[in-house]
Image (spheres, helix red, strand yellow):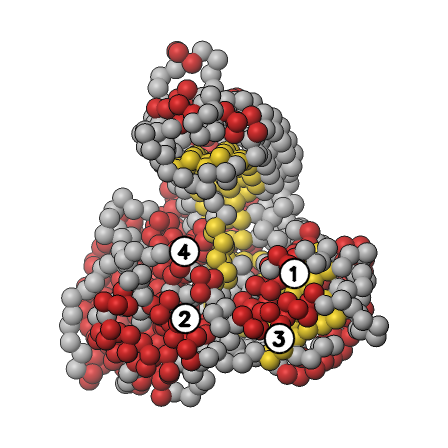
Amino acid sequence: MAEAFAAEIAKSLLGKLGSFAGQEFRLAWGLEDDLARLEERLKAINAVLSDAEKQQSKNDRIRLWLHMLREVLYDAEDVLDEMECETLRREVVKTTGSTSRKVRRFFTSSNMIPFRLKMGHKIKKIIERLAQISSLRSEFNLSEQAIDCSHVLHEETEMNRSFESFSGLIGRDKDRERIINLLRAPIKVGDAHPLVLPIVGMGGLGKTSLAKSVCDAENVRSHFDLKMEACVSDDFSLKLVIQKIIKSATGERCADLDEGELNKKLEDIMKGKKYLLLLDDVWNDEAQKWLLLKPLLSKGADGSKIIVTTRSRRVAEIMGTDAAHNLSFLGQEDCLSLFYKCAFKEGQMELNPNLVGVGKEIVEKCKQVPLAVINLGTQLYGKTDEKEWKSVRDSEKWEEEGDGILPALKISYQRLPTHLKRCFLYCSVFPKDYLFRDLLMVQFWMAHGLILQSSNPNEKLEDVGLRYVRQLISRCFFQDYEDFNYVAAFKMHDLMHDLASSLAQNEFSIISSQNHQISKTTRHLSVLDSDSFFHQTLSKFPNNFHQVRSIVFADSIVGPTCKTNFEKCLLEFKHLRSLELMDVSEFDSFPERIGALKHLRYIDFGNTKIKRLPKSFFKLQNLQAMVTGFELEELPKDVRYMTSLRFLDLTTQQKRLPEGGIGCLECLQTLFIGYCKNLENLCEDMQGLRSLQKLFILGCDSLISLPKSIKCLTTLEELFIMNCDELDLMTIEEKNEEKIQPLSLSLRIVMFGNLPSTIALPEQFLQGSAESLQTFLIKECPSIGEMPECISNLKKLQNLEINDCPRLSKRCRRETGEDWPKIKHIPIIKVDDDDNGEETSD
């Protein structure tokens, strides 16, 4: 990467050595002296790393020294992780050893003496390399500085100030009006079908924001029968574009359909309908590809129209049937308005006239590019130190070549704390237009050790990671933020992705039809063309894969030999931490060798046809996060051997989750059980989930009941149960409630949605959270007849929302409803959006 980040890696290593696990290594492996010397050497180097990283941008020799150090630190991390893997493996054998000889065979034991000798040799070699590198530091006159162990920013972030709050629409009223008029204009004889309107302009001008704003305008939406959109990005893959259009129209992924089936499905969707389609961020200027897509899009009714956003005039000439709308630079006065809106809190401008003047000078350097203005404005939001504003104005980055946008983005990146820089750069392994989910993003970061414990030992790593996400969103490093109550989704602007990729290029490689190379420094790999990867990259660079830590297959692994190729691939990745299969693969089960990836902590095969998991899969004791595919037939009991699992997103064809499996995962923090169409019952031993904080049960149409053991989840803080047609929530209540001990739960937020078979809310269950419940959401539950009496005892409840529950809504109407006395103490109440979240007053 552009920056070595050696200090962050060193902190991570010192934290590992100083942790309980580190002490276990010393005792279990007899390596006390070696590990103590390693720790001593790391502390000595770490003392000067802060100064070195400050100087690296101006001193090439220091930068090279840091990169050499980084390579050694990565190797040290691999050694410690290998020891941790072996310790975990032995712990599993030890704790399950009484079960049977079968378990001991499952985890074939290795001799401790050879392993200890092997690890001791590796540690000594690392100490020697560190000593050589350390001897060079005297040449740089580096000063020792206090080590900052804090990895968490505790500043307040305003999530409502995301990119869309000021998305460049200031000053675009005339552009918006003109495009709306073109879309609403009646068709004339001789008009092309469909009519294609290109919006052309350089990156960062707000083409996408303008186009989406136009498409969302009520007078436009009402003019068309169907609205669709697809982000095309760099690679114009006809099949992928059609899949995206269909998904936008119907929500279906259709990844298993061939080209002919996709074409037929798209035709059926559009037939007889006047549609509006947004093709966003089109780059490919090969006319042939457009000529293949255009006939498919002509199947809609007369008057159908397409908006194309592109930076290329050539693309506009090829695709456009109407004159292109050229988006110009934003006017200077509008740029100032946009900047001040981003940078100042309400009333702050009047109190800081000096900052207004400095801000004007900053805006002039942005050269009328809205994204640059927005980005720097949000960086300075709430800051009142004039020196800080002047440091942005006077940054040396402005001297670099660029149109205002690239220097501005680099300044924004430069101002990030180091730990957020690393998190941002790691996102570049995912392809452009990738839809991130906050909970999974955090797990990916955790898999690579990017999130370290805060100064509060009771704060979970997941909570720290979510704070990182919020901070990057508030600084506009992510955009298109949407909060779906239980999970947030967002994307990276393509220019932000370009920035991350360019800064991460020393460790990051993209395999495409144009590039087959991978360097020895590559640790993160994105495969956009699996055919090129398997048939060229693997064979040409056989020795460059051992150091790779993450791989994203963004392209389908297809063809008759795909499983064999994938198996060969697994042999090469000795230290892989994360594996993502983003598209449907031809094979239906992982190769047995998947179990050899002992460092693996994160795996996502949610978009694959994987039906079965081999026995070896459950040797992955280090695995912390797993997302399964929609076609998985069952999750066996052997999942209990995955003792490090903290996050599980499960879809299965099973009718019942067996006991002795998921219920044994004591480290599990988050559990998604989603779209299991056959699932009727969950496991009855959920009390074993001693660390569970978030439980999501979604789209399980056959689910009849919940296990009574759900009441034993005393650490559970968030519960979402939605779209389960047959579920009766009352199944978790005992018949003789007076005989049951009072529950002691920790629920903060509960949401019940679209549960047509539920006729009453579980009173005892809710009462158990009387001292913790803050938000209660009830949506689309038409059979619930009344609010339980216990609601009046929930004194911490701050927010109650009831939507599309006719009987319950009537009883909870403000002042007049029969249940109003039970809920009137709650500060914020929304019933079918009638009250707009009014605060109650006694």
| Disc 2 to disc 3, C-alpha distance | 22 Å
Quadrant of residue 224 in the image?
Answer: bottom right
Q: Residues within 10 Å of mark 3 (few under 14, many from 20)?
A: many
Q: How many marks?
A: 4
Label 3 SS:
strand
Quadrant of residue 225 in the image?
Answer: bottom right
Residue 199 is marked as 3
Label 4 SS:
helix
Sequence-earlier tag: 1 or 3: 3
Percent x, y of residue 295? 81, 69
Relative to 310, residue 17 above or below: above
Sequence-earlier tag: 2 or 3: 3
Look at discs 1 and 4 and give the one toward the viewer.
1
| Disc 3 to disc 4, C-alpha distance | 28 Å
| Disc 1 to disc 3, C-alpha distance | 17 Å
Kindly identify the residue that appears in the image at 66 percent across and 69 percent down. 181
222 and 2: which one is in front? 222
Q: Amino acid at mark 2?
A: Leu
437 and 635: which one is in front? 437
Relative to 284, residue 771 above or below: above
Residue 160 is marked as 4
| Disc 1 to disc 2, C-alpha distance | 26 Å
**Residue that label 1 marks:** 220
Sequence-earlier tag: 1 or 4: 4
